[in-house]
Amino acid sequence: MRDIDRSVAMTEHAVVIAGGGPTGLMLAGELALAGCDVAIVERRASAELIGSRAGGLHARTIEVLDQRGIADRFLSEGQVAQVARFAGVSLDISDFPTRHNYVLGLWQNHIERMLAEWVGELAVTIYRGREATGFTQDDSGVDIELSDGQSLRARYLVGCDGGRSLIRKAAGIEFPGWDPTTSSLIAEVEMAEQPELGIHRNAFGVHSFGKVEYRIRDGQVVYSDSGPVRVMVTEQHVGPATEPTLRDLSEALIAACGTDYGIHSPTWLSRFTDMTRQAAAYRKGRVLLAGDAAHVHAPDGGQGLNTGVQDAVNLGWKLAQVVKGTSSESLLDTYHSERHPVAARVLRNTMASVALRRPDDRTKALRDTMSELLGMNEPRKRYAAEMSGLGIQYDLGEGHPLLGRRMPDLDLVTANGPQRVFTLLHDARPVLLNLGEPGGFDITPWADRVQLVDAKYVGTWELPALGPVTAPSAVLIRPDGYVAWVGDLTKVGLVDALTTWFGPPAAA
């Protein structure tokens, strides 16, 4: 990773990413894997993130990291729990057909550190200690002004700069949605008195206490005996947009619990709300949005970070192909058409979850009813697939149930020995997987872009929530791991799929 000296003059890059959080880092890694010159502008002077913030990775995000060969880095430090959650209801995913049928408990500061290490290995440029303050775009690129007076020139600019995104505002992209109805304070503090750990409810909301250090044993959280306490307390009234203080936290705790437990020495303190908004467009000219810059919502279910990382993996290979001239700019339109509906669904689910955790008796009755319904097998599978990201299907038209869904990580038998599907995706290159007669496909005009792999698979094809599906003879897998074409040796529709997703055939 090259941290750039402030004396550097106007510099050009193919893509500049504003914001070096999980979404920005993942996008930078994807672009770098594709051989694209990418730089991140990040206002924090160092890679260290104060406070733990988001707390986990869902199954599909872990699969995405596995597709790039880096999942083990995260698994070695995280805590496995085989549940997803919707509206406070735990949804068992241990029977889901994936190697990663669990949520990985891992604080955001660790997630960012490991993503930054990966991005560093890919030699991505990072401009630290400064931020984008404005930009102008023309037909060929974007001029980006930095807070230290320097300028960058890029073919494309991607705003990964959070819910208050300057990039989104400066691009004039609308951010419609709903204002907050509730707010909570979240902090890591020392306490003179020990609160009862766990989740509590009172007349105006949900509160929780837990140690920052913990283990998961037999599906249960076991907290450390010492160390700072992670506090989450619902405020009696929606708090202001200003940064909260220790006094705000003290008053909120006293209102909720009758005491503030002698809180002191905060390492991190923040306020979140259930404000729910989504960018009307994920792209305007040469400016694109991803992560919280494109969608904000309540943290219920731990959807935010995961949705952002998956935005990045959808966008990265498409943007790289456009930059390199392999594909036309129209490929970027599929980023909005695929990811906007996914986030819209996340927004709907989080709003429902917030509504279901209201503390009045009527809502409790509804919550109990929902809990009973989600205890049934089919609703459990459907909502667990949704919360975990394993149920996403992009609209690629009619056809096989696999079309538009994530490709299962099958154990293949190839001429070179055993091979996992996800291993084929480590370099973020698309794969035409032929499971029929070896040598039945000739994709020479795309050979510089698409891997052709002849393989055998013995076993049932099963998809989360859907169950068994008919085994296909061949599948075209995009770099993000989603299936772009399903067919056989008749090759019906294959040329169109190759051209749509990976550009026109090379000249003979």
Image (cartoon, rainbow, N blue to C red):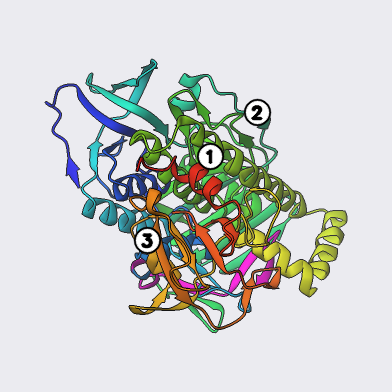
Using the numbered discs, state the Cα–Cα distance from disc 3 to disc 1 in whole angstroms.
20 Å
Q: Is residue 191 visible?
A: no
Q: Is residue 90 magenta?
A: yes
- Front tag of 2 and 1: 1
Task: Give the residue drawn at x 37%, y 42%.
Answer: 506
Element at label 1: helix
Residue picked out by circle 2: 176
Residue matched to label 3: 68
Mark found first going from the N terminus, 3 or 1: 3
Q: Magenta segment: does it hold 445?
A: no
Stretch of the chain drawn in magenta: 73-92
The one nearer the camera, 116 or 15, is 15
- Calculate the distance from the C-alpha at mark 2 to the C-alpha at mark 1: 19 Å
Q: Quadrant of the C terminus?
A: top left
Pointer 2: residues within 10 angstroms few (<14), some, or many (20+)?
Answer: few
What residue did someone put label 1 on? 335
Please state which of the two labelled residues, at mark 2 or mark 3, is closer to the viewer. Answer: 3
Residue toward you, 499 or 153: 499
**Mark 3 Cα within 10 Å, few/some/many (few <14, many 20+)?**
many
